[in-house]
Image (cartoon, rainbow, N blue to C red):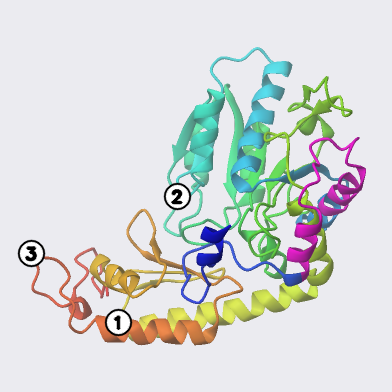
């Protein structure tokens, strides 16, 4: 206990790379109250089982699903793994297929790689288009008779893009494949946009949606939603020594903290609080993107509360040394997520530090060009920052 007293939780003032945020205070209290309950054995822990039903119903309001099935998972990783797990199992039950495969865009979350390895399915990764969204022609070309699932992303983790979900669903279903949408990050902001992404927009089969991101629930709290009970049933195993005789979750024993925190956060914030939160963070996103562009830094036009910009690695490393928690995309872009804890004051301080480090910083050992004038040698030219 003494070591805990000497350590303090990291504050969020300089955390610009995370897709998690500070939980709602009341959700945090509820999580502590239900910490020791186990929704993995609902016959024994009946109160938390009732709250899990409420949580799934609330998530389904957000995701446009009238008759929901699913459970509160540990996060988007578990939900994505379980969606592929169910698709594989259902395909094995219904048809005699060869080596099962899943088709997903290059923007898909790395949890899908974990799923493919764990479940023994092939993963066909297809290119994205010029706007970082799934290329429909490439998806169509990749599908074959052994494709059990197609995955689309509603709010990609690198560029905040929304794949063409209705068109992907048509492609998947024409091939007899399961359609899964990963809305782990985007699910709590997309209801306030014009994007077609939800169960109401297309007959998708399952979705990952995380209350512990923009939903402001405590970690861990993800959501797996399914249109049909058969999807959940495909995950079930017998649990002979519990009061509950079968279990569909991956983790088995789970803390009720995430369930209770989800219910309370959504009761407090859905929909008006989340809408206000989205508007505030999109304002911050636009502000940051404009300020970076005004400094001659190439910015990818943001569509959700996420900014990516072509800032040189040496600049990022200098800012990290000053305590800013920053990350890059696979292509090297600086990536900043305007989560609820990211304030305008914090972004202004970040911009001040960029102005301080860029004029004197040399980019690399073999370049004498300062960071402020490093030219983009790609077609079209322009500043890289």
Instruction: Assess disc 2: are there few (<14), some (14-19) or many (≥20) residues with their C-alpha within 10 Å of its C-alpha.
Output: some
Locate residue 339: give its quadrant. bottom right
* Sequence order check, earlier mark of 3 and 2: 2
Disc 3 or disc 2, which is closer to the eye? Answer: 3
Q: Is residue 55 visible?
A: yes
Q: Secondary structure at mark 3?
A: loop
* Span highlighted in magenta in the image: 26-55
In the displayed image of the protein, which residue is found farthest to the top? 96
Q: Label 1 vs label 3: CA separation? A: 22 Å
- Which of the labelled discs sits on residue 366, or is there none? 3
- Numbered disc 1: secondary structure: loop
Residue 151: image quadrant is top right
Label 1 Cα neighbours within 10 Å, binned few <14 / some 14-19 / many ≥20 = some
Report the number of numbered marks.
Answer: 3
Q: Which mark is residue 340?
A: none
**What residue is disc 1 on?**
296
């Amino acid at each position: 206990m003494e070591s805990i007293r000497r350590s303090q939780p990291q504050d969020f003032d300089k955390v610009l790379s995370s897709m998690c945020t500070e939980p709602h205070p009341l959700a945090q209290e509820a999580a502590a109250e239900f910490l020791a309950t186990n929704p993995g054995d609902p016959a024994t822990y009946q109160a938390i089982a009732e709250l899990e039903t409420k949580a799934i119903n609330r998530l389904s309001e957000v995701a446009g699903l009238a008759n929901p099935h699913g459970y509160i998972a540990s996060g988007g990783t578990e939900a994505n793994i379980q969606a592929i797990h169910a698709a594989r199992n259902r395909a094995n039950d219904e048809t005699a297929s060869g080596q099962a495969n899943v088709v997903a865009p290059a923007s898909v979350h790395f949890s899908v790689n974990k799923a493919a390895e764990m479940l023994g399915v092939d993963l066909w990764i297809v290119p994205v288009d010029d706007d970082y969204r799934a290329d429909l022609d490439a998806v169509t070309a990749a599908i074959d008779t052994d494709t059990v699932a197609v995955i689309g992303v509603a709010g990609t983790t690198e560029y905040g893009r929304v794949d063409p979900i209705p068109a992907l669903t048509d492609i998947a279903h024409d091939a007899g494949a399961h359609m899964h949408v990963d809305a782990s990050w985007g699910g709590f902001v997309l209801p306030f946009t014009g994007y077609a992404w939800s169960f109401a927009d297309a007959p998708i089969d399952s979705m990952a949606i995380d209350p512990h991101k923009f939903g402001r629930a405590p970690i861990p709290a993800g959501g797996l939603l399914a249109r049909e009970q058969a999807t959940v049933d495909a995950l079930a195993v017998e649990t002979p020594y519990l009061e509950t005789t079968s279990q569909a979750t991956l983790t088995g024993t789970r803390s009720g903290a995430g369930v209770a925190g989800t219910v309370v956060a959504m009761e407090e914030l859905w929909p008006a609080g989340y809408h206000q939160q989205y508007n505030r963070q999109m304002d911050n996103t636009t502000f940051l993107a404009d300020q970076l562009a005004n400094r001659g830094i190439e910015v990818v036009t943001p569509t959700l509360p996420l900014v990516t910009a072509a800032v040189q690695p040496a600049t990022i490393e200098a800012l990290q040394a000053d305590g800013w928690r920053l990350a890059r995309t696979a292509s090297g872009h600086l990536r900043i997520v305007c989560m609820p804890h990211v304030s305008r004051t914090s972004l202004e301080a970040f911009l001040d530090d960029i102005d301080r480090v860029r004029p004197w910083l040399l980019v690399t050992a073999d370049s004498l060009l300062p960071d402020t004038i490093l030219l983009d040698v790609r077609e079209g030219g322009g500043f890289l920052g």
